[in-house]
Amino acid sequence: MTITTRVFNEQTGSPFIIEAEGPSGDCPSGDCRLSELSAWKQEHSDFIQQKLLEHGAILVRNFGIDSLAHFNDFLGDFRHATLLDYAGGNSPRTKLLKGIYTSTEYPQEHFISLHNEFSYNDQWPEHLFFCCVTPPVKDGNTLIADGRKVLALLDPEVIEMFEQRKVTYIRNMHDGSGFFGPSWQETFETEDKDKVSEFCKKSNIDFEWKKDGGLKTTQLGLGVATHPITKEKAWFNQADQFHVSNHPRDYYDAMVDMCDGKLDELPQHACFGDGTEMTNEVLDSIRNAFKQLTIYFPWQKGDALILDNVLMAHGRAPFSGARKILVAMS
């Protein structure tokens, strides 16, 4: 087996690909290929780190990372820190092993806008890891876009708004009896209110237990982040995703009517850190920048993807047929 490297698309500059070609040692199984990848990684760890910082994303292909067990083995070699739980996250997922989850379980016809994972927290994962167990029949790409390039496209006035005023994220979670959005039990992976309260206190999350048993949380997050190693600035938030205008117009109107125009009562909402609302024009300019920069690559069975969570935003295209992508964070 030969291991080669290249850039998926020279024009977009990402992802950087590490690919296996030809037969693997004494056997063709994923286990053998993973062993050879592990040995190669030990010899090229500095090279891999350099390419991840340069391109923001690395796609590992043809090494048979096509099961929960193989993904877990892969993570043992490629993560640099403890795997993180998803407690406090805003997407529906299923926990498979400690630190390993299914990717967001929204209906397959839904587009998931590009975002940086946990950018609404005061702490976030450095790296995200994905693997493709079952590729979709059609589409279903995990979309990526470089936050450094997003800054280059946005109006400097918009950048200044977000950099200086930051972003307030508001969530209203029901107690398990509601219809819109997740419950606090699903979000925090517990039925214990005291544990949730303690989690919020430790995470600098303002919270309020409601009379109906629900939970309201408020968090202040960055608009622009500085990478801890490269010191580059990158667009880093989920404001346009949290904002109700991210939904189709009929859904948008229905949600606003439902809360009598009180946007902070919606299942989730974003405004500036000083409490002022974001205009649709500003949010549309952000979405248009992402649209211009979004990179599509087709999933193949056994692919693994590593993202630098500060440098690279990610999302999901709608799809048809079965699709199973696993995810982990560190």
Image: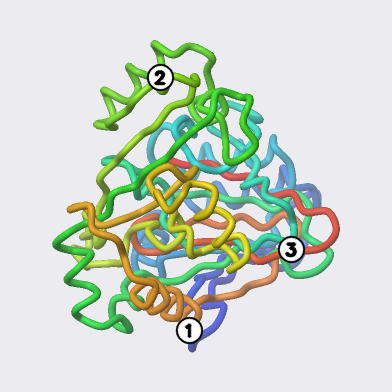
Q: In which quarter of the image is residue 224?
A: bottom left
Residue 154 position, x and y percent, is 30, 81
The front one of 77 and 158 is: 158
Check the image and report above or below for 14 versus 136.
Answer: below
Distance from Cα at disc 3 to Cα at disc 1:
24 Å
Q: Is mark 3 on a helix, strand or loop?
A: loop
Closer to the camera in the image, 257 or 129: 257
Q: Distance between the residues labelled 1 and 2?
A: 39 Å
Circle 1: element type? helix
Q: How far across and how far down the image is residue 136, in percent? A: 79, 61
Q: Tag 2 or tag 1, which sits nearer the N-term?
A: 2
Look at label 3 and name its amino acid: Gln
Q: Name the residue under label 2.
A: 196
- Disc 3 crowd, CA 10 A, few/some/many (<14, 14-19, 20+): some
- Are the two marked residues, 1 and 2, in contact with CB atoms closer than 8 angstroms? no
10 Å neighbourhood of mark 2: few (<14), some, or many (≥20)? many
Between disc 3 and disc 2, the foreground one is 2
Q: Look at the image and name its color scheme.
A: rainbow
Which of discs 3 and 1 lies nearer the camera? The answer is: 1
Q: Residue 300 carries which label?
A: 3
Mark 2: which amino acid? Val
Relative side of 6 to 265, left or right: right
